[in-house]
């Protein structure tokens, strides 16, 4: 089996599994307990916090709060700011956010908040002037993603942060879920106030994430109860998962194979665009402004689901648009926002590589894909 769907989720790294296993057996203390068992797990939790802080370039590890997933981090960041700023009823976000931000902002709109939805151009890029123009005295929060989950397009969050800080008092939230582990991040040199991540996107198990909260930012608590996470998210810590997240963060921090992933992706993308006549790239051609692991390619007049199914039969796992859209048969909101024509958007495939992919796997994919696309194209009414 060849797994080219690393933006949907990743395999748990063996190093990560090994790190968490003792906390599923003999090291079962509650980190809040004062005895030896408790102190041991408390130390493990705080070490995990430091590992995540290191990966993100946070100023201090207390800026990292553990959550259950990226969606929770996104929801909490936005709602937590709004709760603290009841006089400010305006938000700024983009049309290409993940559902965890997009659907929340739509709900807030229904609840009476005003949302400015920033458009992207045909390559999926954002115009800084639009960000500047959207800011108002009553803007409570600006929420943009660092890397798009479908196209890999990167938004210039450093510049956006400067604009937000210069022009408003809004809190700046970045959904970094797809970027963490794929590109370097150094939050202390940015104006980012809140930053979401999710463990399962970088080789930790599903069910654990984190929210970076810049020191001093006023954010309402998410779960009220005991004093865990300094009173901001109560509940006994999921110690094995937090240890796993820390181990995955350290693994990502020390990873030196980004160049290989980028080369494999470039080779695959070039070969597909060169050899398949109805193939077109979705997202900017400037590879510096895209994640190094992602290629989103449309095969015009062909159904993406049919390509996915035939690649799956050949043992190759890819995705059509975002994994959350897989069942819905609605064309991707991200591609619609980029004005990708329907005939191309329906035939979009996302290839997303990871640390375990090999050159042989890319060769094998390139050896079966052109014939699959040609066959389906012949059968399609075009
Ligand atoms: N944000 C982005 C950009 C994502 O790609 C995802 C998951 O695909 C999420 C948020 C949600 O993360 P989780 O699956 O951990 O809830």
Image (cartoon, rainbow, N blue to C red):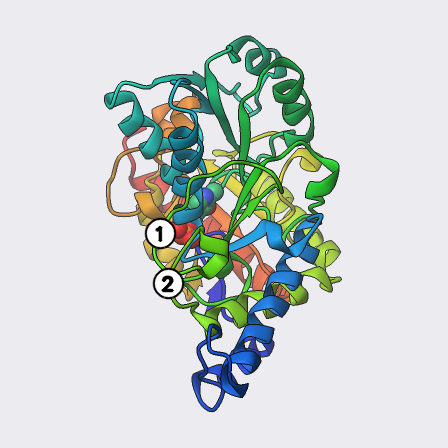
User: Do labels 1 and 2 touch, CB within 8 Å?
Assistant: yes
Q: Which residue is mark 1?
A: 223
Q: In what quadrant of the picture does the C terminus appear?
A: top left
User: From what the image shows, is residue 139 above or below residue 279?
Assistant: above
Total label count? 2
> Residue 49: horizontal and vertical position, in percent?
60, 62
SS for tag 1? loop
Q: Residue at x 67, y 46 (%)?
A: 266
Residue closer to the observer: 157 or 276 = 157
Give the residue at the far front of this rendering: 34
Q: In what quadrant of the picture does the N terminus appear?
A: bottom left
Residue 338 seen in this snapshot: no
- Ligand 1 lies under 8 Å from the Cβ of mark 1: no
Q: Residue at x 33, y 46 (%)?
A: 324
> Residue 100: horizontal and vertical position, in percent?
37, 40
Q: Which residue is mark 2?
A: 235
């Amino acid at each position: 089996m060849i797994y080219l769907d690393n933006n949907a989720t990743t395999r748990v790294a063996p190093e990560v599994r090994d790190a968490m296993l003792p906390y599923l057996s003999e090291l079962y203390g509650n980190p809040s307990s004062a005895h030896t068992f408790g102190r041991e797990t408390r130390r493990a939790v705080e070490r995990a916090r430091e590992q995540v802080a290191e990966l993100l370039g946070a100023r201090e590890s207390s800026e990292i709060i553990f959550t259950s997933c990226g969606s929770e981090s996104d929801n909490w960041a936005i709602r937590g700011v709004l709760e603290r700023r009841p006089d400010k009823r305006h938000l700024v976000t983009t049309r290409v956010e993940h559902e965890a931000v997009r659907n929340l902002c739509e709900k807030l709109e229904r609840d009476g908040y005003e949302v400015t939805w920033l458009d992207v151009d045909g390559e999926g890029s954002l115009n800084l002037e639009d960000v500047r123009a959207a800011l108002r005295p009553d803007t409570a929060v600006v929420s943009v993603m660092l890397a798009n989950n479908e196209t890999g397009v990167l938004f210039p969050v450093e510049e956006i942060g400067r604009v937000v800080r210069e022009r408003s008092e809004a809190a700046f939230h970045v959904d970094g879920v797809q970027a963490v582990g794929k590109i370097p991040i150094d939050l202390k040199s940015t104006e980012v106030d809140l930053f979401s991540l999710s463990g399962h996107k970088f080789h930790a198990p599903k069910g654990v994430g984190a929210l970076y909260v810049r020191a001093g930012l006023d954010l309402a608590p998410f779960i009220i109860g005991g004093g865990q996470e300094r009173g901001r998210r109560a509940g006994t810590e999921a110690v094995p998962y937090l240890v796993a997240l820390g181990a995955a963060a350290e693994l990502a921090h020390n990873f030196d194979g980004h160049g290989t992933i980028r080369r494999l992706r470039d080779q695959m993308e070039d070969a597909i665009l060169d050899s398949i006549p109805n193939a077109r790239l979705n997202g900017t051609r400037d590879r510096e402004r895209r994640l190094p692991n992602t290629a989103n390619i449309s095969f015009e007049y062909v159904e993406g689901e049919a390509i996915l199914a035939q690649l799956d039969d050949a043992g190759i796992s890819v995705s059509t648009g975002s994994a959350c859209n897989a069942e819905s048969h609605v064309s991707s909101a991200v591609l619609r926002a980029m004005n990708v024509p329907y005939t191309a958007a329906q035939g979009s495939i996302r290839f997303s590589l990871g640390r375990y992919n090999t050159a042989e796997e890319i060769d094998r994919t390139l050896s079966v894909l052109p014939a699959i696309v040609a066959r389906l194209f012949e059968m399609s009414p075009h």
